[in-house]
């Protein structure tokens, strides 16, 4: 006979199922504040069954929900231009580089995108005439990507349209609060990076 699962294993499995259920019932059509309210109610229910569930579960879930909403906001802004976030990040990365030029590997580092995705993204941007791709001028064995004049014009036109909603996003935040939020998020990112290194995951 197989070994019976431990009490701790059963609790962990139950917690995963309950949190998954909480996520599923907070449907996409709900406003973010409603999703957070739903999440709070769900976590309160979980803690009745498993009192040792840390409050940090809620913090993590809030950050995930905010991240999803920010992603959706950006995608909504880019959709009329038939671009997605990954393609726009690639354009911004090239726009920021000296001469508007870089290698696929360097762009992957700046955008946190994978090499396989970068091939697809660069194909799409080349087809749109927003970048070029070919042998490097200094080393023809290396592939070089460069933003085109049309790509530069698009970035220069697109970015300012995003600023008003960005300002609304942080409405009511003092400069001190923004600085504190920036510092705390970077501190959290450092801790998460330490966990990745300890687990042997890629940074």
Image (cartoon, rainbow, N blue to C red):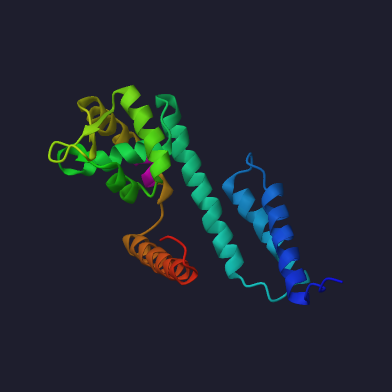
Expressed as whole percent of the image width and height from the top left, the position of residue 130 reads: 28, 27
**Is 194 located above or below residue 110 in the figure?**
below
* Occupied quadrant, residue 180: bottom left
Residue, far right? 1
**Is 145 located above or below residue 60 in the figure?**
above
Q: Residue at x 49, y 50 (%)?
A: 67
Q: Residue at x 36, y 36 (%)?
A: 88
| Residue 47 visible in image | no
User: What secondary structure characterizes most of the magenta part?
Assistant: helix
Task: Work out whether residue 44 or residue 140 is closer to the camera in this orientation and state it.
Answer: 140
Expressed as whole percent of the image width and height from the top left, the position of residue 174 reads: 35, 60
Expressed as whole percent of the image width and height from the top left, the position of residue 55 reads: 61, 70
**Is 66 located above or below residue 94 in the figure?**
below
* Occupied quadrant, residue 160: top left
Q: What number of labels is visible?
A: 0
Task: Work out whether residue 200 or residue 96 is closer to the camera in this orientation and state it.
Answer: 200
Does 24 sit left or right of 179 as displayed?
right
Does 189 sit left or right of 145 as displayed?
right
Expressed as whole percent of the image width and height from the top left, the position of residue 199 reads: 49, 69
Q: Quadrant of the C terminus?
A: bottom left
Span colored in magenta: 163-167
Verify whether residue 58 appears in magenta: no
Task: Work out whether residue 105 or residue 85 is closer to the camera in this orientation and state it.
Answer: 105
Residue, far left? 138
Q: Quadrant of the N terminus?
A: bottom right
Verify whether residue 164 appears in magenta: yes
Q: Residue at x 37, y 39 (%)?
A: 118
Q: Residue at x 39, y 25 (%)?
A: 81
């Amino acid at each position: 006979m197989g070994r019976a699962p431990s009490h701790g294993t059963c609790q962990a499995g139950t917690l995963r199922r309950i949190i998954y259920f909480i996520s599923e019932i907070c449907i996409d059509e709900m406003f973010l504040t409603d999703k957070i309210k739903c999440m709070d109610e769900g976590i309160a229910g979980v803690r009745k069954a498993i009192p040792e569930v840390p409050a940090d579960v809620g913090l993590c879930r809030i950050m995930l929900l905010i991240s999803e909403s920010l992603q959706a906001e950006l995608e909504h802004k880019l959709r009329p231009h038939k671009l997605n976030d990954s393609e726009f990040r690639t354009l911004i990365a090239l726009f920021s580089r000296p001469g508007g030029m870089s290698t696929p590997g360097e762009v992957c580092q700046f955008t946190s995108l994978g090499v396989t995705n970068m091939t697809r993204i660069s194909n799409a941007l080349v087809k749109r005439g927003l970048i070029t791709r070919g042998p490097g001028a200094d080393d023809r064995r290396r592939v070089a990507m460069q933003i085109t004049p049309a790509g530069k014009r698009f970035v220069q036109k697109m970015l300012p349209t995003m600023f008003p909603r960005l300002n609304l996003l942080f409405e009511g935040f003092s400069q001190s609060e923004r600085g504190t939020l920036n510092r705390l998020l970077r501190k959290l990112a450092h801790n998460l990076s330490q966990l990745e290194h300890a687990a042997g995951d890629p940074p």
